[in-house]
Image (spheres, rainbow, N blue to C red):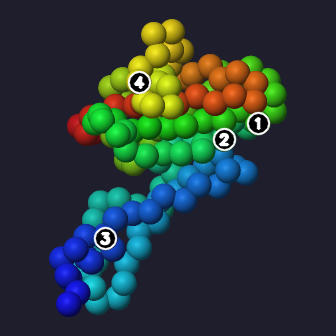
Amino acid sequence: MIDLDSLRAKLNLASLHVDARLGRFYAEAEFAEGLCDIHKGSLPTSLEPLSVSPGNVVVSAVKKAEKDDGIIIRLIEMAGKRTTAKIKFDKTGFGILSSAKETDLMERPMKDGSAKLPAKDTVSVRIPGKGFATVLVKTRKKR
């Protein structure tokens, strides 16, 4: 027997797609005709929840933090140059930034982490050449 409530919940989840060549990701809702309720909401039909610069930095992952309320963003520097990456967030997609911390791969905050909030919608973090950075970002609902 099919558990329709469980199936509806799974179909209503948005899947994230990563385009590593462009360092961007986008959300795409997956719907099956007749299996879930589709309604008009306040979000636009498409949006870019975050963007990363400069071009030698790509997003390798965006996910919910394992043991925290935040969002984990993993970045990779591709050109072999030490870089300060900037992640700009769209408040429609994420809300308002409240904090950012650099973490290790186990998502533990780093004592000497470089993540900062230079603007209300931007996180910056230093990445070594051909290296990576993991950032824990917390947001609050937009007002």
Q: Amino acid at mark 1?
A: Met
Q: How packed is label 1: few (under 14 Cα within 10 Å), some, or many (20 or more)?
A: some
Left or right: residue 113 versus residue 37 is right
Task: Kindly identify which residue carries mark 1.
Answer: 78
Q: Amino acid at mark 4?
A: Arg
Left or right: residue 103 versus residue 3 is right
Give the alpha-carbon distance from disc 1 to disc 4, as whole Å.
24 Å
Which numbered mark, 4 or 2, is in the foreground of this view? 4
Earlier residue among tags 4 and 2: 2
Give the alpha-carbon distance from disc 4 to disc 2, as whole Å.
22 Å
Q: Secondary structure at mark 1?
A: loop
Q: Is residue 114 above or below residue 140?
A: above
Q: How packed is label 4: few (under 14 Cα within 10 Å), some, or many (20 or more)?
A: few
User: Would you identify the image quadrant in which residue 8 lies?
Assistant: bottom left
Give the alpha-carbon distance from disc 4 to disc 3, as whole Å.
29 Å
Residue 94 x %, y %:
37, 43
Earlier residue among tags 1 and 4: 1
The reply to whether dot 2 and dot 1 touch (C-beta < 8 Å) is: yes
Left or right: residue 88 versus residue 79 is left
The reply to whether dot 1 and dot 4 touch (C-beta < 8 Å) is: no
Give the alpha-carbon distance from disc 2 to disc 1, as whole Å.
7 Å
Earlier residue among tags 4 and 3: 3
Q: Amino acid at mark 3?
A: Lys
Task: Kindly identify which residue carries mark 2.
Answer: 58
User: Would you identify the image quadrant in which residue 59 lies?
Assistant: top right
Earlier residue among tags 2 and 3: 3
The residue at the point 62 percent across, 19 percent down is: 126
Q: Amino acid at mark 2?
A: Val
User: Which labelled disc corresponds to residue 108?
Assistant: 4
Task: Kindly identify which residue carries mark 3.
Answer: 10
